[in-house]
Image (cartoon, rainbow, N blue to C red):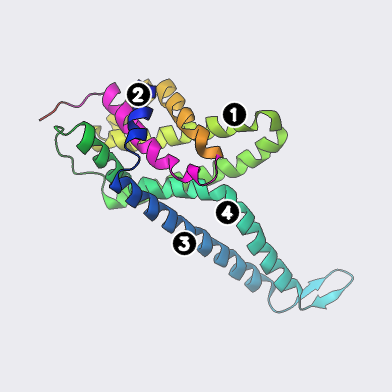
Amino acid sequence: MILSSIVKALRQIGDQRFRQVLLLGIGLSVLFLVGATLGVFTLINWSFGPEASLPLIGPVSWASDVMSWASVLAMLVLSVFLMMPVASAIISLFLERVVQAVEDRHYPNLPVVTGIPLGQALFDMLNFLLVLLAANLVALLLYALFFPVAPFIFWGMNGFLLGREYFQLVATRRLGWAEAKALRKRHTGKIWLAGTLVAVPLSMPLVNLVIPILAVATFTHLFHQLSPVPSD
């Protein structure tokens, strides 16, 4: 069931709507990270002011510049790790397009759905973004402490988070939030395993940006296998 869902998703990866969502996700992710970097730079520059006082040295005028540019460098390094979770969360905002593309091709006789309201989609995206960022930042410490098994921690954690969020959103379109949550809990093991298998390529730069779309398509197929929706 899981492997067939992944294979079907892979076969549709060239879909035009998939590409549109990918470009939107990457573009908005870059804008988000650039905005965050500028925000941190401005905040530190404002906090230190034109001069800062250092112990045993006294007032210095260059400390603010050093701290500001150091913050930019730190944000650029962090962006390497944060690009994937940010893109994953932002792509969830356009999940409807990917799911509809899958259903149009593989389940053409399904009843029409109204989709998730924009306000709810924005709330879900922001909530997912915060969870992903927090989890991946905490995971940096775990990677250092348990270096030999760091890849398994990365795959398992992101697989769980992607599966939990994307399956819930896909199922909510047709079942409503409460019923979708109950279905997700009944099949937690399958969803986590599917998410982990999809998350393995997340370790590969650039390829990892396609994974959120592949995950949405995979969980769309998995949902329809776990809870078939009657056709019109």
Camera-near label (2 vs 4) is 2
Pick whichever of labels 4 and 3 is earlier in the sequence.
Answer: 3
Residue 79 is labelled as 4
User: From what the image shows, is residue 58 above or below residue 74?
Assistant: below
Q: Is residue 112 left or right of residue 103?
A: left
Residue 42 is labelled as none
Quadrant of the image containing the N terminus:
top left
Query: Tag 1's secondary structure?
Result: helix
Pick whichever of labels 2 and 4 is earlier in the sequence.
Answer: 2
Residue 31 is labelled as 3
Distance between the alpha carbons at the discs numbered 2 and 4: 34 Å
Q: Report if residue 151 lies within the magenta region.
A: no
Distance between the alpha carbons at the discs numbered 4 and 3: 12 Å
Give the amino acid type for the residue marked by disc 2 in the picture: Ser
Q: Residues within 10 Å of mark 2 (few under 14, many from 20)?
A: few
Pick whichever of labels 4 and 1 is earlier in the sequence.
Answer: 4
Q: In terms of secondary structure, what is the magenta stretch mainly?
A: helix
Q: Is residue 111 at least partly visible in the picture?
A: yes
Q: Which residue is mark 1?
A: 152
User: From what the image shows, is residue 51 above or below residue 123?
Assistant: below
Seen at 59% across and 29% down, the residue is 152
Q: Is residue 82 left or right of residue 72?
A: left
Q: Is residue 190 left or right of residue 47?
A: left
Quarter occupied by residue 13: top left
User: From what the image shows, is residue 119 above or below residue 15?
Assistant: below
Q: Report if residue 205 lies within the magenta region.
A: yes
The region drawn magenta spans: 204-229
Q: Which residue is mark 2?
A: 4
Quarter occupied by residue 38: bottom right
